[in-house]
Amino acid sequence: MLLRSLKITTALLLAVLLFGCASQDDEELSADSGEQQMYENAQRYLRNKSFDLGVRSLQLLESRYPFGKYAEQAQLELIYAHYSAFQHEAAVEAADRFIRLHPQHPSVDYAYYMKGLAAYSAKSDVFARFLPTDVSSRDTSHAREAFAEFSQLVSRFPASPYAADAKARMVHLRNLLARHEIIVANYYFRRGAYLAAANRGRYVVENFQRTPAVPDGLAVMAQGYILLGMSDLAEDAIEVLALNYPDYPALDKDGNFKSRYSLEGMQRSWINKATLGLFDPTPPPQFDSRELYENVR
């Protein structure tokens, strides 16, 4: 009986200790804390990278003291806390709210900047943060949104300390969007949708000038027009490609377009011909010259 009582007492003590540890953070987040104490708690969480607790603390501070001296700062720091906790959509919403409530705030440019960062990161996942992935092959809707947000920051606040970084990110995003168009064009080539591929190449040339994807855009146009039998348009694209990018991999030393899908027709290997197309089939044209042009300034 005594042994059983000791076991019950020990179990109760352990439960109390565990409950105390689990509730410690909730006690520190209590709405009964003073405004300054709550703000200092939030700062401590952010410094310690406890971003989930930081979010909760800042939200509690704002709800408890909506007109307090730390309210606006709490709303601003909540954007960062959400972003750092990988709550990207919540960060965008928090930035939108701050911009709507405080359009003339001295730090509203920061809200625009963080909104751009959060929008760009909204589609990322835990694997993308640790494994190399080709971002340009994924959905680019958030990249377009981020570009628009950074563009607003740069146009509205050209002297902002965040403007330079925003411009650099816009260059990266523009390159990413252009490369995405080439990836889609290569997909259309594999599907036999040659007009759609040529149109993607033309879109890159017309809308993403001075990006590393332009030479591939010209090559896509040339190849697409060749496959469509539009020789004049194909020759025009090849001429522009040879004039501006003479070292492009699909050009020979004389500026002629090298492809198994040439102006003279599809070039088939003797094995393919001998086996009536069963072996060594001609692969669809694919263009990707990133290694050659992406590091060129």
Image (tube, rainbow, N blue to C red):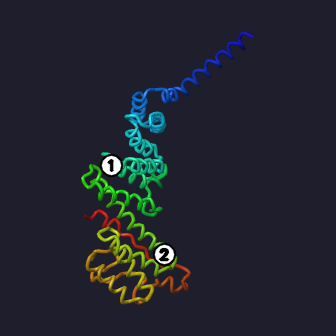
Res 208 label: none
Name the image quarter holding the N terminus. Answer: top right
Secondary structure beneath label 2: helix
Q: Nearer the viewer, residue 1 or 270?
A: 1
Q: Where is residue 119 in the image (x, y as percent from the top left)?
A: 43, 54
Secondary structure beneath label 1: loop
| Left or right of 248, for residue 125 | right
CB atoms of marks 2 and 1 within 8 Å = no
Q: Position of residue 239 (x, y in %)?
A: 29, 83
The residue carrying mark 1 is: 104
Query: For the point 34% across and 70% down, which residue is it?
Result: 208
Q: Which of 73 and 104 is in front in this view?
A: 104
The residue carrying mark 2 is: 188
> Which mark's residue is nearer the viewer, 2 or 1?
1
Q: Which of 130 and 155 is in front in this view?
A: 155
Name the image quarter holding the C terminus. Answer: bottom left
